[in-house]
Image (cartoon, rainbow, N blue to C red):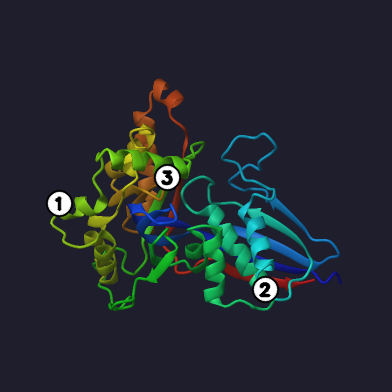
Amino acid sequence: MTDCTTITVNSPAKVNLTFEVLGLLPDGYHEVRTLMQSVSLFDELTFDIKPAREPSLTISLQKGSNALAAQPGSPDGQFPLGEGNLIARALRLFLSSIERPRVLKVDVAVLKNVPIGAGLAGGSGNAAATLVALNQYFGGPLDGQELTALAAKLGADVPFCLKGGRLLGLGRGDQLTAIDEGGGAVNEEISEDEIGGDDTLHFVLAKARHLSLATPWVYQAWDEKAAARELMSLEEKVKDRGIDALPCDYAIANLQKHNLKEALRVFGNDFEQVVFPHYKQLKEIKTRFIASGALASHMTGSGPTIYAVAESAEHARELMSEFRRREAADTSLVCATKFDQVDLYAVHSTEGGAMVVQVEKK
């Protein structure tokens, strides 16, 4: 008996259905407005925690992970195993925030399914999973509001990854509002003829395997084009379509009524205007999805992942097959050397964030 507790937590990826950049906040961060959705692509983190005389933390990647561990001097886009990992930062923050922290030896094994550097909040989800695991280990000293406050200190996406589901994000994206606030029944009866047949959204995610975008660069590029008045916001585009409502509000209202077709009219991402001119492969991925029969296709977050909306799980699989067929048909020898390999993931919307799935005492 080693007094070891093993806690397994799943942390799902995140997709931005809408993403708008509104300007700068007084603290220098950008103000955004975004409708976020957790999806069924998730990392699995296994925490082995036991009392110790000296504190220690070991982070490792499990076999089969969709990532490479970073080594000293390794290029960006690999999974860090040291103190800079958000898991380590979340551990330190949690222990400094409770009244009776213990000295612990913590070993974290990560099965990394969410690609890193993808704009899918994989790292933020790992941070949220760490907060959830430690709160479980200590018997729940922090309530949901207190955990959310800690999460916000770790990054703008961490509060969402803690809660999950479908939420509106304001401020830096960390001020969260449930979409059923303000009226509308989410669980009303649904017609068999309506897309999906239930409240579930289906997607295909496309990630160029070796491409990662630096979020600060994306925001800087946005600022430069905004200063030159070379941008058209998603809100302006929606008004041009005859819709006199904010994109997120219109999407929420129609998703509540299970009218996906109408909600899709306002899905979009302000950052596409600054990213696509520099990374033409991403625009081609979006174009190929539409040609393959996607209901809609947009970049999520600061990229580079592109999502396509499907009618059903079966349609998502068909989209993947048709995407691959068109990819093969479009690819010449020149293109094959120019563009990166694309990884595809068929996923659906989920209701929760980081969640404990197993606890075992040894």
Q: Is mark 3 on a helix, strand or loop?
A: loop
Q: Please state which amino acid type lies under the numbered disc 3.
A: Gly
Say left or right for 74 vs 12: right
Q: Please state which amino acid type lies under the numbered disc 2.
A: Ile
Q: Is residue 287 visible?
A: no
Residue 242, position as x, y percentages in the image: 13, 56
Give the number of the disc on residue 98. 2
Q: Which of marks 1 and 2 is in front?
A: 2
Give the number of the disc on residue 240. 1
Residues at marks 3 and 1, CA–CA distance in whole angstroms: 25 Å
Q: Earlier in the sequence, mark 3 or mark 1?
A: 1
Q: Is residue 308 above or below residue 105?
A: above
Q: In which quarter of the image is residue 86?
A: bottom right
Specify few, some or many for label 3: CA neighbours under 10 Å numbering under 14, 14-19, or 20 or more.
many
Q: In this view, does 14 lie above or below 184?
A: above
Q: Which one is nearer the viewer's eye here, 152 or 251?
A: 152
Specify few, some or many for label 1: CA neighbours under 10 Å numbering under 14, 14-19, or 20 or more.
few
Q: Earlier in the sequence, mark 3 or mark 2?
A: 2
Q: Nearer the viewer, mark 3 or mark 2?
A: 2
Q: Is mark 2 on a helix, strand or loop?
A: loop
User: Residue, x 33% and y 33% (percent of image)?
Assistant: 277
